[in-house]
Image: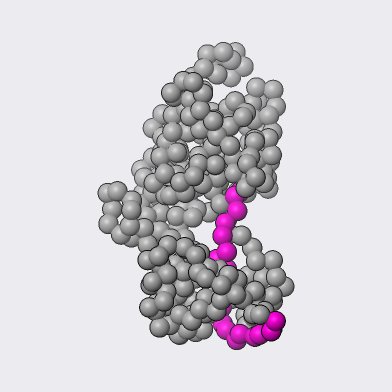
Amino acid sequence: MKKIYDLIIIGAGPAGMTAAIYAARRKIKFLVIGLALGGQMSWSSDVGNYPGYTTMTGIELTKRFQESLKEYNIQIKPEEVIDIKKESKIFRVKTKENDYKTISIIIASGKKPKKLGVPGEEEFLGKGVSYCAVCDSHLFTNKEVAVIGGGNSAMDASIMLSKYAKKVYLIDINPKLGGEPHLRESVFKNKKIKIIQSAKTTKIFGDETVKGLNYIQGNKEKTLKIDGIFIEIGLVTNTDFARIVKKNKWNEIKIFRSTRTNDENLTNIPGIFAAGDVTDIPAKQIIVAAGEGAKAALACFDYLEKYKTKNEKFI
């Protein structure tokens, strides 16, 4: 019989990594599947509210998490999950490369950048178009770039890029910037950042790399010549593969709590748990995601004990 895992954790962000550490300490048979190590945490330019650490970048905090994974010799399969199915008493987790069997699942797949959906976006991805200022800012030293968006992530990206780029254009479709007041203040004070508001980006163009973009402002179509474009218009959940669980209108996985205090992070399918930003919890923070990963793991262990008692002959 093909190996059956006790648990498969889908996602390698703070929720998934925390769940993995708990699983390693419990010494169960588990597997972690995830393409983006650190998830959204690795995109953050500054993290100043994680207890026990002073302000650091998201990449630095991700490395701290990795150190804990190494301590327990936890390996992460860099594969993309495309489907989950319930078959008899187990689940099948299908990736583009493999097919795995497991008794339980924790979905901690987080979110991914929302795409702009304009001509040239896909064509120039990695050739001047980016969704991660933390990752790619240094590639645009002394160049001119644009950030598309008007919320916290767009302003944060603009500030980050201003440390490298010669000029940063912040292009917002709305008449006023949103987000937190302290970020707006930082953007307004930054002489390297020029804000272009009420502007809708319509096209990205170039040859081998990005050379500029077109946008409509008022009734006029305008052209901006730049070397790079960072798209920061929000996030969408990584839940396309999780068709068997219930979601809300934003495609976030609904989690429930039963009458028992240790039954946390339940989905509508017994044996499938969910944690972090992929769920409908309102607080989208690194420390909250890590805590949710721990809660999901503890609830899952309780489920596994009951399962193995009932299905001793099967396993």
Q: Residue at x 59, y 25 (%)?
A: 270
243 relative position to 305: left or right: right
Rendering coords of residue 139 (x, y %) = 49, 76
Number of numbered discs visible in the structure rendering: 0
Q: Is residue 77 magenta?
A: no
Q: Quadrant of the C terminus?
A: top right
Task: For residue 125, say whether it is visible.
Answer: yes
27 relative position to 272: left or right: left
- Of 263 and 108, nearer the camera is 263
Task: For residue 206, say whether it is visible.
Answer: no
Q: Residue at x 69, y 66 (%)?
A: 117
Res 166 → quadrant? bottom left
* In the image, residue 297 above or below residue 202: above
> How would you classify the magenta stretch by its main secondary structure?
strand
212 relative position to 30: left or right: right
* In the image, residue 128 above or below residue 310: below
Q: Residue at x 56, y 82 (%)?
A: 227
Res 73 → quadrant? top left
Span colored in magenta: 219-239
Res 93 → quadrant? top right
Rendering coords of residue 98 (x, y %) = 66, 42
Q: Quadrant of the N terminus?
A: top right
- Of 313 and 290, nearer the camera is 290
- Of 297 and 48, nearer the camera is 48
Rendering coords of residue 221 (x, y %) = 69, 83
Rendering coords of residue 70 (x, y %) = 39, 46
